[in-house]
Amino acid sequence: MSRQMGDSQRRFLQTMMACGIVDEPGARRLYQYCCETHNSEYTPDQLDDFIDTINSKLQPLFMQIRKGISEDSGHQYYALVNMAVTDVTRMSSDYADNELELFVKTMDLIVGSDNGSASSTDILNSADTLTSKKLKKSETEHLLNRLVHDKWLNEFCCVICFCSLMEPYIRTMYQDQVKVCHICHNIAIQCQICENPTCGIKIHNPCVARYFKGRPEPRCPACEDFWPHEIPEPDVRSSPSLAMDSKIRLFHLQPFVSMECFQTERGGRCLVARRGDRRVK
């Protein structure tokens, strides 16, 4: 029998609906805040169990709160993910069809590259091959800036949050091209590759830093060949703040009462928070 969601889980979900993605320290602070606000039991090491209760209620909506890592920093994040692969996940409500088409072409460039990135020049050239409404150069540049701002791409056009937000889509669309990191077992796009042709395992740069730290001679963990790549220094910086405190204060003033599922005009489903007699998407 699945556990029932209480007010603490509802408040946590409401915040995730507003933020989309939260770094791990922020998620732990939010977990503590929700439990203390609603006088429910708070156990610091039970965050994942707390989220599992929420996920059991999200499953019929094809949604899930998932933990992932940033490929460039190794920091962990929690993200509210659309598990359906009918569109480019949750981007479909925020971007026009031609913008989504260009993003898919950018994904093709990134996944098919040797270094997990795509140059702005290649992306601008892809804009000329759109089958939907063409984008001008200025519109394409504006779209790239927006994708960076929305944290779908970083400044080098490498997709961020692969392991959480985009994983269902990537695993389905690029199943023959995508491998997982040998260390953390998450999708590996921006990574180092073993040069032994019979091996070829991939390891994220942050995982490389942690795995080879203190080892006098780096060797592949799979085939034991010498690892010829540069070993980066472990990133000991804390993960970037995602302004969680302001979100928490916002929802302190607007308590979450219930959630409902509604059919959309396209035949999909959407999750709606209800506060009193008001519905808030």
Image (tube, rainbow, N blue to C red):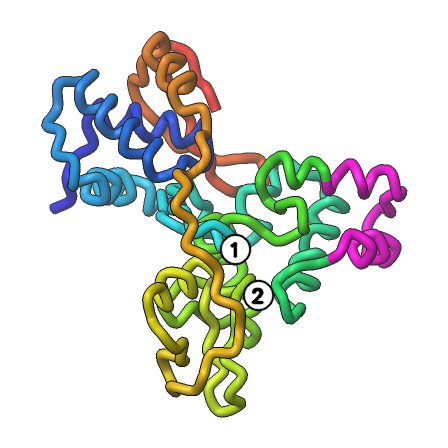
Please tell me whether mark 1 sits on a helix, a strand or a loop. Answer: loop
Q: Residue at x 30, y 23 (%)?
A: 11
Q: Residue at x 73, y 42 (%)?
A: 144
Amino acid tagged 2: Met
Position of residue 63 measured from the top left corner of the image (x, y, whole percent): 40, 44
253 above or below 221?
Answer: above
Specify the label residue 85 is tagged with.
1
Position of 112 compared to 77: left or right? right
Please tell me whether mark 2 sits on a helix, a strand or a loop. Answer: helix
Q: How many marks?
A: 2
User: Which one is nearer the viewer's eye here, 36 or 120?
Assistant: 120
Specify the label residue 280 is tagged with.
none
Q: Are circles 2 and 1 on residues that touch, CB within 8 Å?
A: yes
Visible residue check, residue 131: no
User: Which one is nearer the viewer's eye here, 55 or 114?
Assistant: 114
Say if the magenta span includes residue 38: no
Pointer 2 local density, CA inside 10 Å: few below 14, some 14–19, many at least 20: few
By secondary structure, the bulk of the magenta-drawn segment is best described as helix
How far apart are the alpha carbons under marks 2 and 1? 9 Å
Position of residue 203 measured from the top left corner of the image (x, y, whole percent): 45, 69
Visible residue check, residue 269: yes
225 above or below 32?
Answer: below
200 above or below 39?
Answer: below
Position of 195 compared to 69: left or right? right
| Tag 2 residue | 173
Q: Nearer the viewer, mark 2 or mark 1?
A: 2
Position of residue 141 measured from the top left corner of the image (x, y, whole percent): 80, 41
Amino acid tagged 1: Val
Q: Residue at x 62, y 45 (%)?
A: 154
Say if the magenta span includes residue 120: yes
User: Which one is nearer the viewer's eye here, 134 or 67?
Assistant: 67
The magenta region covers 119-144
